[in-house]
């Protein structure tokens, strides 16, 4: 991977080289301020020197670091080799003069205490862990953080505690909003991921935070209210049973019990604490991880202003084992913890992978200053066009299917599909996207799920990006919203008036993709996603709406629907 503004690979000769053997120390007991001990494994250079420490901190068994996983990244759907090793490559880091410290958060693995699910105590423990590490004879007093997914999410929360010996962080693949990124995309419950994720955690007692935090009386009252109000939950047994047996899946239970954004999510969301982060941040986003981490990386870049920050926007990413980008991590931490001038801070702050062109590019901002915002209109006959619609072009409708049969899944769920004509020239779309959809429903709520695809001349398609919106959350936060990035509070759902045409400004996740000449841009609008839809959707599907509702997409001169695209002019 290059990040060099045309300097080639010269920086690779300036970063730490693999000159050390590795020494492993298992199950160190690290005391927290309240007497609880965390379990920590240390992978350090095998000598008597003192080195910078890189902390990987999460609720997954440390034993995962010892599994026999190939160093090359397996395919995400491979039967073997797809383990939850997201802390980083210990041997790679130790060989280059770093102590890789893999720690279980309290209440998980062999750490004492109660699991907090990213609660404030978990961040406080991170502070204590960093300060303890800085005092060890094998640490030179400089500490950073590494790892992806949970290991990245927690970095923002720990950094906001401002531990004095933390020099920088590198959350290159992680969520920053626990409500929007993890639990409720567009206000729709992330049923598939939350059902799966709980099985990966190593918490011992398996009790939801909601059950722990409320009195028995308040817990029962909240359970009854959710059961009475949430029609969709009552139609999906795997979710509904948790209202009677929450310990079957504490993580999903917590999300079900908190359907609206608020303090419970805020204390677990990095973006709520960005203003307290005073160390440099190397953030990132994989362009194919629309369903979990993608928005978090862009949110971090948008809302933190440290001029030393860097941001990577990279192609397809494999979480397990996490072995990618380590050269960039070493370059980053060599600068901040070893005083090694690797040239990284002299370069553009954004490293961008452009799909389609399949090339790296260095940029100075995001969205790009030279962006031309263009409207691509939904038209009659399933067309997409730069031309505005005529007065009489009408609408398209599709039905939600409360109970989906397999033949419906294999044939594709009901949807409205729109395509451009084959492009006469390359079209680069790089930046945030919005779908301004004029829609109506035959019930008081429904789901709008959006996909943009790149269609090759041979008819094969590739998902470029996605978006979601529960119709009752259509109201915008006008202070935070921009035309290309509509934002909402998800605190006060408003039922839809059946038959009324409403504006649905749907945030479609940022991307960078060149639709090559001869290709088509395709837009799919539907109400349901499912586990057989693609490799990521094996777990990243959402709670279906239980309503037998017809969705209508309007696209005439009076009610135009369009994609707002960030078109980047091609270099002459």
Image: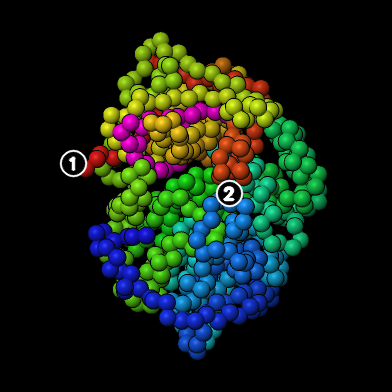
- Local SS, label 2: loop
| Residue 243, quarter of the rendered image | top right
Residue range in magenta is 504-527
Relative to 460, residue 24 above or below: below
Q: Is residue 93 rendered to the left or right of residue 76?
A: left
Please name whichever residue, 242 or 476, is drawn nearer the observer in this view of the structure: 242
Could you tell me if residue 316 is visible in this image?
A: yes
The mark lying in front, picked from 1 and 2, is 2
Q: Is residue 532 rendered to the left or right of residue 8?
A: right
- Tell me where residue 245 appears, x and y as whole percent: 80, 47
- Tell me where residue 49 appears, x and y as whole percent: 47, 87
What is the C-alpha distance between the residues marked 1 and 2?
Answer: 41 Å
Residue 431 on the magenta span: no
Q: Quadrant of the N terminus?
A: bottom left
- The residue located at (51%, 28%) in the rendering is 525
- The residue located at (64%, 43%) in the rendering is 192
What label does residue 77 carry, if any? Answer: 2
Q: Quadrant of the C terminus?
A: top left
Question: What residue did someone put label 1 on?
Answer: 572
Relative to 309, residue 23 above or below: below
Residue at the outermost top position: 392
- Tell me where residue 172 appears, x and y as whole percent: 46, 58
Residue 516 on the magenta span: yes
């Amino acid at each position: 991977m290059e990040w060099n503004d045309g300097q080639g690979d010269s920086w690779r000769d300036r970063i730490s080289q693999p000159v050390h053997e590795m020494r492993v120390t298992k199950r160190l007991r690290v005391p927290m301020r309240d007497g609880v001990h965390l379990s920590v494994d240390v992978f350090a250079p095998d000598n008597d020197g003192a080195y910078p420490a890189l902390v990987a901190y999460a609720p997954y068994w440390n034993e995962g670091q010892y599994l026999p996983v190939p160093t090359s990244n397996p395919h995400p759907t491979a039967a073997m080799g797809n383990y939850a090793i997201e802390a980083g490559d210990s041997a790679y880091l130790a060989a280059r003069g770093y102590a890789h410290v893999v720690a279980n958060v309290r209440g998980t693995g062999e750490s004492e205490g109660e699991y907090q699910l990213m609660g404030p105590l978990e961040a406080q423990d991170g502070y204590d862990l960093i300060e303890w590490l800085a005092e060890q004879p094998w640490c030179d007093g400089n500490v950073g953080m590494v790892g992806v997914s949970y290991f990245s999410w927690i970095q923002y929360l720990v950094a906001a505690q401002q531990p004095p010996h933390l020099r920088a962080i590198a959350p290159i693949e992680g969520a920053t909003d626990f409500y929007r990124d993890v639990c409720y995309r567009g206000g729709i419950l992330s049923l598939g991921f939350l059902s799966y994720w709980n099985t990966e955690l190593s918490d011992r007692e398996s009790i939801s935070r909601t059950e722990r935090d409320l009195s028995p009386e308040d817990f029962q009252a909240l359970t009854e209210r959710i059961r009475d109000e949430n029609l969709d939950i009552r139609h999906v047994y795997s979710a509904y049973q948790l209202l009677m047996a929450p310990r079957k899946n504490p993580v999903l239970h917590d999300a079900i019990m908190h359907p609206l954004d608020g303090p419970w999510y805020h204390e677990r969301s990095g973006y709520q604490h960005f203003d307290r982060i005073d160390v440099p941040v190397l953030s990132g986003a994989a362009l194919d991880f629309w369903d979990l981490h993608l928005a978090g990386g862009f949110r971090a870049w948008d809302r933190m202003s440290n001029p030393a920050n860097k941001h990577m926007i990279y192609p397809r990413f494999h979480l397990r084992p996490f072995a990618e980008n380590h050269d960039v991590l070493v370059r980053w931490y060599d600068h901040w913890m070893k005083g090694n001038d690797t040239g990284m801070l002299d370069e553009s702050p954004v490293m961008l992978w452009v799909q389609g062109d399949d090339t790296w590019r260095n940029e100075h901002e995001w969205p790009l200053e030279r962006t031309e915002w263009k409207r691509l209109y939904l038209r009659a006959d399933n067309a997409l066009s730069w031309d505005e619609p005529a007065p009489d072009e009408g609408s398209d409708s599709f039905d939600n299917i409360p109970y989906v049969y397999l033949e419906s899944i294999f044939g594709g769920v009901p949807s409205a599909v729109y395509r451009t004509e084959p492009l006469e020239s390359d079209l680069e779309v790089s930046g945030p996207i919005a779908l301004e959809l004029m829609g109506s429903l035959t019930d008081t709520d429904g789901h709008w799920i959006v996909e943009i695809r790149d269609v090759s001349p041979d008819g094969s398609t590739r998902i470029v990006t996605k978006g979601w919106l529960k119709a009752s959350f259509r109201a915008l936060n006008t202070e935070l919203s921009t035309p290309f990035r509509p934002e909402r509070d998800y605190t006060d759902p408003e039922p839809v008036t059946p038959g009324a045409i409403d504006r649905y400004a749907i945030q479609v996740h940022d991307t960078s993709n060149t639709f090559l000449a001869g290709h088509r841009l395709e837009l799919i609008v539907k109400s349901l996603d499912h586990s057989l839809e693609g490799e990521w959707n094996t777990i990243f599907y959402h709670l279906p709406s239980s309503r037998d509702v017809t969705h209508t997409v309007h696209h005439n001169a009076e009610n135009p629907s369009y994609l707002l695209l960030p078109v980047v002019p091609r270099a002459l």
